[in-house]
Image (spheres, rainbow, N blue to C red):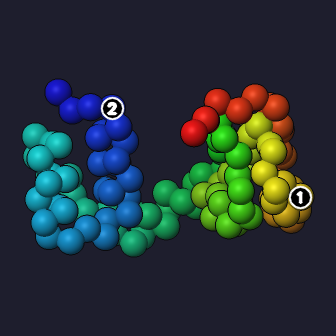
């Protein structure tokens, strides 16, 4: 069978749809038949319908750009352990977009 992470990656690649031919040939092997390509309108309608989405990290959000991008995807709730040097900047980004951020104080991602 197809591994879980390969299934997740296949979905992301499908949505992004910007694969080179060699990458597409590898990607399409995950399916019994190739899915139809999403049109720009399909993507736009899907994104417009997203709301009240939660994003979480088991490490932290070290830069506000993650929050800037998340707001484009309907994210309204952010969960993270905190502890980044940029926490204040990330909090300000959440405040700018009206997102609620909760700190878990539990970091599960260790190097």
The part of the image, by quadrant, that contains residue 104 is: top right
Q: Which residue is mark 2?
A: 4
Residue bearing the label numbered 1: 88
Q: Are marks 1 and 2 in contact (CB under 8 Å)?
A: no
Residue pushed farthest front? Answer: 111
Image x and y of residue 9, in percent = 34, 47
Q: Nearer the viewer, residue 102 or 33?
A: 102
Instruction: Locate the N terminus and report the quarter of the image it occupies.
Output: top left
Q: So how many labels did they put on this image? A: 2
Ranked by sequence position, the earlier of labels 1 and 2 is 2
Q: What is the x, y in percent for residue 19?
A: 25, 68
Q: Residues within 10 Å of mark 2 (few under 14, many from 20)?
A: few
The C terminus is located in which quarter? top right
Q: What SS does tag 2 mark?
A: helix
Q: Secondary structure at mark 1?
A: helix
Instruction: Give percent across and percent down for residue 40.
Output: 39, 72
């Amino acid at each position: 069978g197809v591994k879980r992470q390969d299934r997740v990656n296949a979905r992301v690649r499908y949505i992004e749809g910007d694969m080179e031919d060699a990458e597409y040939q590898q990607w399409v092997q995950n399916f019994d038949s190739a899915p139809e390509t999403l049109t720009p309108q399909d993507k736009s309608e899907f994104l417009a319908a997203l709301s009240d989405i939660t994003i979480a990290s088991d490490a932290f959000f070290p830069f506000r750009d993650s929050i800037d991008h998340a707001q484009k995807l309907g994210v309204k709730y952010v969960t993270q352990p905190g502890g980044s040097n940029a926490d204040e900047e990330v909090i300000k980004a959440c405040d700018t977009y009206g997102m609620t951020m909760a700190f878990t104080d539990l970091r599960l991602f260790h190097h």
